[in-house]
């Protein structure tokens, strides 16, 4: 026996009408898929090098923060922040060190991550 839309409970009707991409809470700043892909690629390379060991992602009302840890019990050594309020000013992306020093800020995530992304160089 199948349920028709008339037989379904109102909460089930609302859940079915909701698009799958609307899982994020309204009023929260998040990283999109491409941004997370770039950040996690960098994170994976640094873990493989043995420099980073843990991370945390915080989605706040005013900004999204990706924190990188050398050990889980420490303060983050780097924070990658996305703050849309600064999009028209200095750029919404920034890399912040453990001391609170802003290493780089800009409009493009790729360029901002160059502050902590060490490429191999021929010597």
Image (spheres, rainbow, N blue to C red):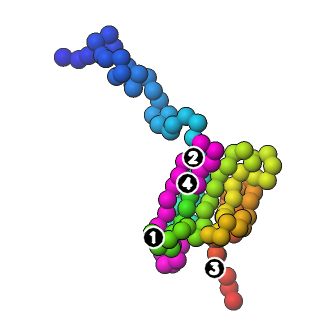
Q: Secondary structure at mark 2?
A: loop
Q: How far apart are the alpha carbons under marks 3 and 2? A: 35 Å
Q: Residues within 10 Å of mark 3 (few under 14, many from 20)?
A: few
Q: How far apart are the alpha carbons under marks 1 and 2? A: 22 Å
Q: Determine the residue positioned at 67% across, 49% down.
A: 83
The residue carrying mark 4 is: 36
Left or right of 120, for residue 16: left
Q: Secondary structure at mark 3?
A: loop
The residue carrying mark 3 is: 120
Q: How far apart are the alpha carbons under marks 3 and 1? A: 30 Å
Q: Mark 2, mark 4: which one is toward the viewer?
A: 2
The answer to whether residue 42 is seen in the rendering is yes
The residue lying furthest to the right in this view is: 89
Labels 2 & 4 near each other (Cβ < 8 A): no
Q: Which of the marked residues, 3 or 4, is nearer the chain's N terminus?
A: 4
Asked where in the image residue 106 lies, by quadrant, the reply is bottom right
Relative to 71, is 26 above or below? above
Q: How far apart are the alpha carbons under marks 4 and 1? A: 24 Å
Q: Determine the residue positioned at 59% across, 42% down.
A: 61
Q: Determine the residue positioned at 67% across, 63% down.
A: 95
The answer to whether residue 21 is seen in the rendering is no
The residue lying furthest to the top in this view is: 6
Labels 3 & 2 near each other (Cβ < 8 A): no
Q: Which of the marked residues, 3 or 2, is nearer the chain's N terminus?
A: 2
Q: Could you say which disc has been placed on residue 73 in the image?
A: 1
The residue carrying mark 2 is: 60
Q: Determine the residue positioned at 60% across, 67% down.
A: 78
Labels 4 & 1 near each other (Cβ < 8 A): no
Asked where in the image residue 81 lies, by quadrant, the reply is bottom right
């Amino acid at each position: 026996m199948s349920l028709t839309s008339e037989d379904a409970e109102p909460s089930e009707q609302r859940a079915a009408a909701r698009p799958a991409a609307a899982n994020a809470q309204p009023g929260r700043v998040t990283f999109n898929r491409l941004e997370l892909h770039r950040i996690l690629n960098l994170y994976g390379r640094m873990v493989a090098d043995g420099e980073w060991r843990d991370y945390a992602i915080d989605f706040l009302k005013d900004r999204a923060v990706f924190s990188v840890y050398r050990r889980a019990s420490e303060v983050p050594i780097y924070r990658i922040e996305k703050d849309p309020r600064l999009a028209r000013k200095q750029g919404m992306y920034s890399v912040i060190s453990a001391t609170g020093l802003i290493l780089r800020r800009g409009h493009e995530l790729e360029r901002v991550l160059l502050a902590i992304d060490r490429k191999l160089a021929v010597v």
